[in-house]
Image (cartoon, rainbow, N blue to C red):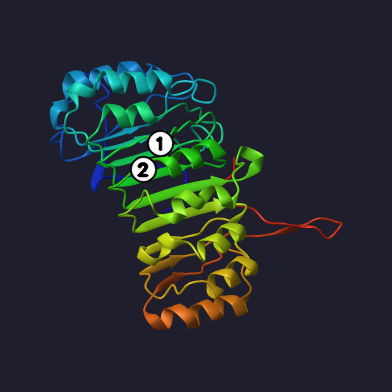
Amino acid sequence: MTIGGHVYNLYGLPVVHAPESRTADGLPDPGSVAWRIASDTYDPEEPWSEVFARFCEMIDTTRVRALIVGAWENAYETDSTAIIEALVAARHRLPALRALFLGDMESEECEISWIRQTDVTPLLAAFPGLEEFGVRGGNGLLFPALRHDSLRKLVVESGGLPVAVVRGVGASELPALEHLDLCLGTSEYGADSEAADLEPILSGARLPRLRHLALRNSEIQDEIAAVVASAPVVARLEVLDLSLGILGDDGATALLAGQPLTHLKKLDLHHNYLSEPLRQRIRETLEAEGVEVDLDPGDADADEDEDGIVYRFVSVGE
């Protein structure tokens, strides 16, 4: 899964835009699609709140199962507080809501590092039946520790994730969570966590049902690989995703020297800086045991300055 593209499917449902006028006809069954509610970041014809109000008037919201929040006006300087407040206020009109994605904007609408977020946990508190939650943008993002008994999938996309968010997720009680995806990013855009901050997640103590773990798009991917190599949670994973960062031979060597990974269904390391001998070792070790391995280097190109210093880049920063 790439970072930053428009969400095209949520909760297994295709995406449909909310009605653009009160005379729209031919609308799909409210529960058969994921509804995308969006304004424009720059010079919008109407604010997000009006688009949402029209949606609530025209659609039987009691049957809506999935919502996607797209751009809101001036998202590069106005955070998501008003959006969250509107959704929380409408919680009794959305009793069937099971999936929510906040901040579905491509770079042309607002660069991922520019999207202004805030504390998103009121949404989880307001919708105790929510099973999937995703948020894009780490600027101002807060995720204090909570308990949620229904959430099965949590995705946080960023070019730079604050350590407080990493720690908040790690301290949360999420007994139903099966899929966790954290895009950690780079310090240039706000990432300030260390590999040690992932320990509560990697212990698996609060995540008894976790099967898919993605810790990706990180400038400390080698360090993450090293702690993952001995992490208790790995033994019960089906998918381990360390892609999109600056993983090099040191990290890959640590993975191979750690606990066996032959139980995995998939190991995703695409967008990496591995040497060919390391790629071959990984293939020989895991593919022979039936593990699907993605070692595609993609666009992971390094730059070297005039002093011979080599710079490596995560897939998504700004």
Residue furthest out toward the right: 307
**Residue corresponding to mark 1:** 104
Q: Residue at x 56, y 39 (%)?
A: 163
Query: Where is residue 248, by image quadrant?
Result: bottom right
65 vs 147, left or right, is: left
Let me know if residue 246 appears in the view: no
- The kind of secondary structure element at disc 2 is loop
Using the image, determine if residue 214 lies above or below residue 74.
below
Q: CA distance from mark 2 to mark 1?
A: 7 Å
Q: Position of residue 62 (x, y in %)?
A: 14, 27
- The kind of secondary structure element at disc 1 is loop
Q: Position of residue 12 (x, y in %)?
A: 24, 48
Of residues 106 and 317, the one nearer the viewer is 317
Q: Residue at x 62, y 45 (%)?
A: 186
Within-10-Å neighbours for mark 2: few <14, some 14–19, many 20+: some
**Residue corresponding to mark 2:** 7
127 vs 5, left or right, is: left
Q: Are marks 2 and 1 in contact (CB under 8 Å)?
A: yes
Let me know if residue 166 appears in the view: yes
Q: Residue at x 37, y 34 (%)?
A: 146
Q: Position of residue 75 (x, y in %)?
A: 49, 25
Using the image, determine if residue 61 lies above or below residue 161.
above
Q: Residue at x 53, y 28 (%)?
A: 140
Counting residues from the N terminus, which is met first, the one under dot 2 or under dot 1? 2
Using the image, determine if residue 24 lies above or below residue 293.
above
Give the residue type that dot 1 points to. Asp
Of residues 151 and 18, the one nearer the viewer is 151
